[in-house]
């Protein structure tokens, strides 16, 4: 059975696929200090229902998380001066990208660093027939670690690593992996890039 599992990944073929919504739309964040008060009003343009707004500290610990309930322009006032001195980041988690803007707090003063604002493109994974397709923009050429696991029809939670590789030195990642039709069962894909981990599960 192990040989069958190991042979279930036959090939990885480079594709040249661009993500349709992966254009740089500029900064969605417009932080500004309201006059004569210590609160900071943050406005985000063109949000969609279901997107997430997150505030994290420098260690990645989530301090605030909100699921956006309406599309359009998001505006909210935060008292960021209550945070301990240090570095933080706003993240807008969208369908296929995460937009970030760092800020710092020092002696009750809040400073946004617009020059360090970044966009991280999330990988897109889908299963069609017995093929797994993976696409990702990596404009900074960040490597993408790919791991594919197989657990058959077992409900024990055990997963066997059947394929792994690291894709690097490219700004547009496109791969397709062919699974043997005579090895049905549960598969999961784990992708690591930009210090983040993404997981998808499929049943063939």
Image (tube, rainbow, N blue to C red):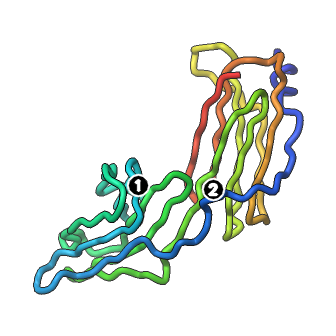
Left or right position of 92 against 199: left
Residue that sits furthest to the front in the current view:
72
Residue 166 location (% of width, % of height) = 76, 52
Residue 72 location (% of width, % of height) = 35, 61
Report the disc number at residue 48. Answer: 1
Q: Residue at x 60, y 60 (%)?
A: 21
Left or right position of 113 against 133: left
Q: Residue at x 88, y 33 (%)?
A: 10
Look at the picture and state if 164 lies above or below 72: above
Left or right position of 119 against 59: right
Q: Which of 174/112 is in front?
A: 174
Q: Picture quarter containing residue 122?
A: bottom right
**Helix, strand or loop at disc 1?**
loop
Look at the picture and state if 92 lies above or below 162: below
Residue 61 location (% of width, % of height) = 37, 56
Residue 143 location (% of width, % of height) = 71, 59
Residue that sits furthest to the left in the current view:
36
CB contact under 8 Å: marks 2 and 1: no
What residue sits right under mark 2 in the picture? Answer: 193
Report the disc number at residue 111. Answer: none
| Mark 1 surroundings within 10 Å by alpha-carbon count, few (fewer than 14), some (14 through 19), many (20 or more) | some
- Give the mark, 2 or 1, whose residue is nearer the N terminus: 1
| Mark 2 surroundings within 10 Å by alpha-carbon count, few (fewer than 14), some (14 through 19), many (20 or more) | many
Q: Residue at x 70, y 18 (%)?
A: 185
**Helix, strand or loop at disc 2?**
strand
Residue that sits furthest to the bottom in the current view:
36
Q: CA distance from mark 2 to mark 1?
A: 25 Å
């Amino acid at each position: 059975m192990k040989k069958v599992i190991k042979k279930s990944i036959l090939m990885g073929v480079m594709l040249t696929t661009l993500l349709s919504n992966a254009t740089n739309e500029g900064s969605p964040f417009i932080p500004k200090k309201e006059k004569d008060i210590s609160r900071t009003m943050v406005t985000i343009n063109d949000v969609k229902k279901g997107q997430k707004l997150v505030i994290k500290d420098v260690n990645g610990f989530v301090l605030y998380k909100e699921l956006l309930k309406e599309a359009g322009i998001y505006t909210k006032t935060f008292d960021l001066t209550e945070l301990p001195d240090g570095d933080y980041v706003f993240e807008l988690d969208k369908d296929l990208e995460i937009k970030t803007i760092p800020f710092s707090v020092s002696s009750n003063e809040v400073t946004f660093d617009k020059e360090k604002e970044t966009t991280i493109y999330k990988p897109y994974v889908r299963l069609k027939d017995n093929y797994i397709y993976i696409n990702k923009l990596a404009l900074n050429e960040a490597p993408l670690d790919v791991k594919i696991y197989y657990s058959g029809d077992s409900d024990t939670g055990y997963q066997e690593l059947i394929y792994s590789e690291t894709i690097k030195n490219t700004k547009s990642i496109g791969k397709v992996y062919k699974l043997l039709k005579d090895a049905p069962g549960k598969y999961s894909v784990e992708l690591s890039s930009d210090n983040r981990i993404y997981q998808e599960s499929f049943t063939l």
